[in-house]
Image (cartoon, grey):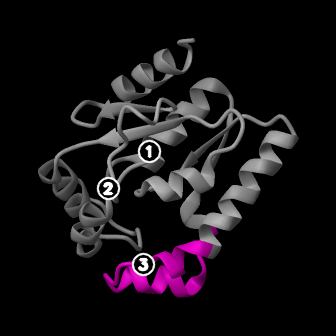
Amino acid sequence: MGIVGAGKTTVGTLVAQKLGWQFADADDFHSPKNIEKIRRGIPLDDADRAPWLSALHNAILQWNAKGRNVVLACSALKRGYREELRAALVRFVYLKGSSRVILDRLRSRHGHFANEAILESQLAALEEPGSDEPDVMTVDIDQPPDAMVSEIIAKLQEP
């Protein structure tokens, strides 16, 4: 989880590959209307996100029912969104970084519908996980992806 440009897809794909798990990107669950809004730099509101979160929740329940291990790259910016996504065995990894690092990444990436125009609204919407969310681990993104992956896998293996 994390804001646009934090590395959710890059790091999530690498974690899934290392563990032999399935990878899924929450962006693939957005409606065409939501994608167009994001592309134009228009922040999504809770009403826009409601069907998206419901679809993600249902996918998580299906993966759990089938015993599948899945890494899902998803912003999950607000505590309420994380609550919607919580199901048995769900763990969150918060990719945390400074707006400077994020902005540099966004300016160097091409081909994704979410760009720096959406960054400010994502920072405003972000409700960082607190100590009352013990299923959330925090990883600093100001390190190479391989280092983040190693840290995540080590933390996942902790009791």
- Neighbour class for label 3 at 10 Å: few (<14), some, many (≥20)? some
Tell me the mark number nearer the camera, choosing from 2 and 3: 3
Provide the residue designation for mark 3: 44
Residue 117 lies, in percent from the top left, at: 24, 76
- Neighbour class for label 1 at 10 Å: few (<14), some, many (≥20)? few
Q: Earlier in the sequence, mark 2 or mark 3?
A: 2
**Amino acid type of the residue tagged 1 in the rendering:** Thr
Q: CA distance from mark 2 to mark 1?
A: 10 Å
The residue lying at 58 percent from left, 84 percent from top is 32
Q: Is residue 93 magenta?
A: no
Residue 156 lies, in percent from the top left, at: 54, 21
The residue lying at 86 percent from left, 42 percent from top is 65
- Neighbour class for label 2 at 10 Å: few (<14), some, many (≥20)? many
Q: Nearer the viewer, residue 108 or 37?
A: 37
Tell whether label 3 touches label 2 (CB within 8 Å). no
Q: Earlier in the sequence, mark 1 or mark 3?
A: 1
Q: CA distance from mark 1 to mark 3?
A: 23 Å
Q: Is residue 15 above or below residue 82?
A: above
Q: Which residues are magenta?
A: 29-50
The residue lying at 22 percent from left, 53 percent from top is 102
Q: Residue 5: give its label.
A: 2
Residue 158 lies, in percent from the top left, at: 53, 12
**Amino acid type of the residue tagged 3 in the rendering:** Leu
Provide the residue designation for mark 1: 10
Q: Secondary structure at mark 1?
A: helix
Tell me the mark number nearer the camera, choosing from 2 and 1: 2
**Going by the picture, which residue comes out furthest to the left?**
100
